[in-house]
Amino acid sequence: MFSVFKKKSSQSAHIFKDVVTQEYHGINQRDLSHGSLRVIEVLQHAGFEAYLVGGGIRDLLLGKHPKDFDVATSAKPVEIQKLFRKARIIGRRFQIVHVRMGPEIIEVTTFRGSAENSHLQRANASGMLVRDNVFGSVEDDAVRRDFTMNALYYDPSNHEVLDFVGGYDDLEDGLIRIIGDPETRYREDPVRMLRAVRFVGKLGLQLEADTAEPLRRLAPLLRDVSPSRLFDEILKLLQAGHGQATFPELVKYDLLRPLFPQTEALFGEADDLHHQHLIDLALLNTDKRLNEGKSVTPAFLYAALHWPKVQHRWEELQAEGHGRAPALAIACSETLDFNQQFIAIPKRFSVTIREIWELQMKLEKRHGRRPDSTLEHPRFRAGYDFLLLRELSGEIQGGLGEWWTQYQIADDALRRDLIASVKDDQDELKARCPRRRSKRRD
Ligand code: ATP
Ligand code: MG
């Protein structure tokens, strides 16, 4: 079967090309985005090479539904722009062009080269590429990509998949293999380490041994990546529907430490299983909501990821004699401020994270008018959901979540009964958290 449908031909001295025909790969043109096919048609008609590449083709070959399709072409950014009425050059590390086709925005990139000595490519002291706008051939472009499965080029005009790096065979074997020398490639761009574990979680494939080997050793290089880029990468990692499967991979390869050092440090403590459980539940909750098509806010996940430290500090500060409310406020500020140097959380989310944390204390107060005003809080729902996860994780006991579940649906009379049933918030709190009481001075 292989020899009938899969032709192999040598391209140059060191680059080989596999051509995988339609009968073999079975990609159905109907599953491809209309906009990207149209973009390729226009580019090819103008005499340029153009292919679909990246995650879209990979996911189709795995029988999954692709998120989007990227186009790679021999046309330069300005040449691409001239061919389309609605096209914008986006200049980040690599120049790319966004072409609008009806409701779709197609990302079009020019083949990138690897001219080591070019003044257009620069690496810093740890080997990280800081400027990278050298153009090249499709073969050059393939070897510049991260993993072999992400470097498959589909040509809609003849339905062939071009493979210069053995990606097709790796996909068939379920292997994620980095292209080239693993250490060099991770040093060039440490985010590739996060991408490696992201694909494990998302696709359920395995890291090939040489691809996995340097991860633990090189994990600290993530400290060199800009905190705002890391924020974006963490969203793709943990808030794209596969967070629960991906998080343990971060832990396994020591990648949690450079990203969430305080959380990682507390994970080592024997009595901290409930925090791991809390994070696991928050990830599960997020995956579930996403898979049901519901909205999610990064604030909820970050509230869970940093909660171990906040909760720990909250207790510590109270033991040092701070009041319960000021202690929480200080713990929140300290934790958020400290972690900005690793992952830059935009202000609009950090405000919400703080509100979710501060609601944990407000939700404890259930006398007089307090419950009604807490219920009015714009973040009540997120704070209440967070409280439920804390209870489920075993961090706190005592049915506070259940009380709020009832309170929300109760009529006025029942609400008065519910309030009366709580004798004293503080007494009740102490009964619920004996461990905490022993640490307090009062
Ligand atoms: P997803 O389906 O999650 O979008 P993807 O592989 O398409 O996965 P993108 O971030 O959309 O990920 O990137 C598109 C393609 O660009 C990748 O498939 C890969 O070929 C290439 N690429 C992306 N990031 C890197 C990187 N850091 N280093 C090298 N190549 C990269
Ligand atoms: Mg993609």
Image (spheres, rainbow, N blue to C red):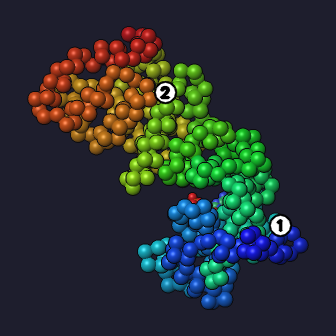
Residue 144 vertical position relative to residue 51 in the rendered view, above or below: above
Q: Horizontally, is 177 left or right of 301 in the view? A: right
Label 2 Cα neighbours within 10 Å, binned few <14 / some 14-19 / many ≥20: some
| Residue at the extreme bottom of the image, as rendered | 46
Q: How many marks?
A: 2
Label 1 Cα neighbours within 10 Å, binned few <14 / some 14-19 / many ≥20: few
Q: Nearer the viewer, residue 152 or 186?
A: 152
Q: Tell me the element at label 2.
A: helix
Q: Position of residue 212 (x, y in %)?
A: 73, 46
Badge number at residue 274: 2
Q: Name the quarter showing ligand 1.
A: bottom right
Point out the frontmost of discs 1 and 2.
2
Look at 61% across and 65% down and name the residue there.
61
Q: Nearer the viewer, residue 122 or 401?
A: 401
Residue occupied by mark 1: 117
When asked about the image quadrant of residue 78, the answer is bottom right
